Image (cartoon, rainbow, N blue to C red):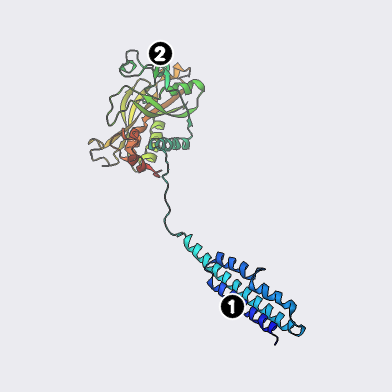
Amino acid sequence: MSPEVSDIMRAFEEARDQGLAAVKEATDGHSLEAARIRILGRKAPLSKARAGLGSVPREHVKTLGMLANEVQTEIEQAFAKKARAFGRAERTKRWERERVDVTLPGDVPPAGALHPLTKTIWEIVDIFIGLGYQLAEGPEVELSTLNFDALNQPFEHPSRSTRETYYVAGRDDVVLRPHTSPVQIRAMEAQEPPIYVLAPGRCYRRDELDPTHLNQFAQIEGLAVDDGITMADLKGTLEVFARELFGRDLDVRLRPHFFPFTEPSAELDVECFVCRGSGCRVCKQEGWIEVLGCGMVDPAVLEWVGYDSERYTGFAFGMGVERVAALAHGVPDIRYFYENDLRFLSYFQGAE
Ligand code: PHE
């Protein structure tokens, strides 16, 4: 073996050792790739050893060439194998880092909800829509004519005084409506019978604030005018309403009362949902809870809007939304509805 041949063989062996050592030393994908470029690059020992092949006697070229390829392949495979191992390890590490436990409960973002009074209005509206009623509206700033005169309110009635009703400054003919009843007038002025309307809206009264009084509150007015409407229709309608809202098995009663715009007039009581009639704190030992005012529309009101009171009859009712909501949910003070305490409001969340 000529000295050149053994030198070249040694050079290949050294290149192999160096290459395999570099693979072994690499600690991650980056250092491995850097080593690969260095070991298999043009100035690396392997390339230099290959360059020596040119000056080798012919009979040795084949053997040395095979050795060169063998060393090259061995080094390349060692790099590829280690690269795969690093890849696997890095993937595993990343999966570990990015692991998500899908069984953990998520963060529940605070969700908004309808105000309990809005819910109550919608519930009541739904009941009457189901009975064939349509919605009606009127302004909160109302003509005193529609609020009092059209509703047969005697001129000397105390509710006309500025001690009970808010008047627009400097005017004696415009009020903040103290009830939704003027919407009855507006509905009748806008159309001929048959009329079946429900009118929710805000009202204002000069009242002392206490657990059952606010000076701004919501009412829902109902009006039905048609051929042959009787007190029995009023009672039947209100029974359906009260049972839907307060519970199917609660008794209701009409108790005689007085309103200038209805004749006869009554108040609707519902059997106390707490004590069922035996008397308790909620019903003030009455066994019954007053829910709304109602009655047969006074012929004078029908005549005021130009209806033929010989032909048509009707009934009307009006209820305080805060009061009804308080009764339905056992709330002891209607002022809670306007304090916007989230602990109170969230009690109604989801309670449809
Ligand atoms: N408007 C009356 C009130 O506010 C309620 C009512 C409405 C009574 C319709 C009879 C008919 O007290």
Residue holding disc 2: 173
Mark yes or no: residue 311 visible. Answer: no
- Judged from this view, the residue extending furthest toward the front is 3
Q: In the image, what residue occupies the spot 74% across and 77% down?
A: 54
As rendered, which of 16 and 283 lies closer to the eye?
16
- Where residue 282 appears, as percent x and y from the top left, is 26, 37
| Picture quarter with the C terminus | top left
**Secondary structure under the numbered disc 1 in the rendered image:** helix
Compared to residue 219, the image places residue 243 above or below, namely below
The location of residue 323, given as percent across then percent down, is 33, 33
Image point (38%, 39%), residue name: 245
Using the numbered discs, state the Cα–Cα distance from disc 2 to disc 1 in whole angstroms. 109 Å
The quadrant holding residue 182 is top left
Ligand 1 shown in quarter = top left
Contact between labelled residues 1 and 2, with CB atoms less than 8 Å apart: no
Q: Which residue is mark 1?
A: 17
Q: Is residue 70 above or below residue 254?
A: below
Secondary-structure class at tag 2: loop
Residue 302 in the figure: left or right of residue 337:
right
Q: Amino acid at mark 2?
A: Asp
The label on residue 308 is: none
Q: Is residue 31 among the parts visible in the rendering?
A: yes
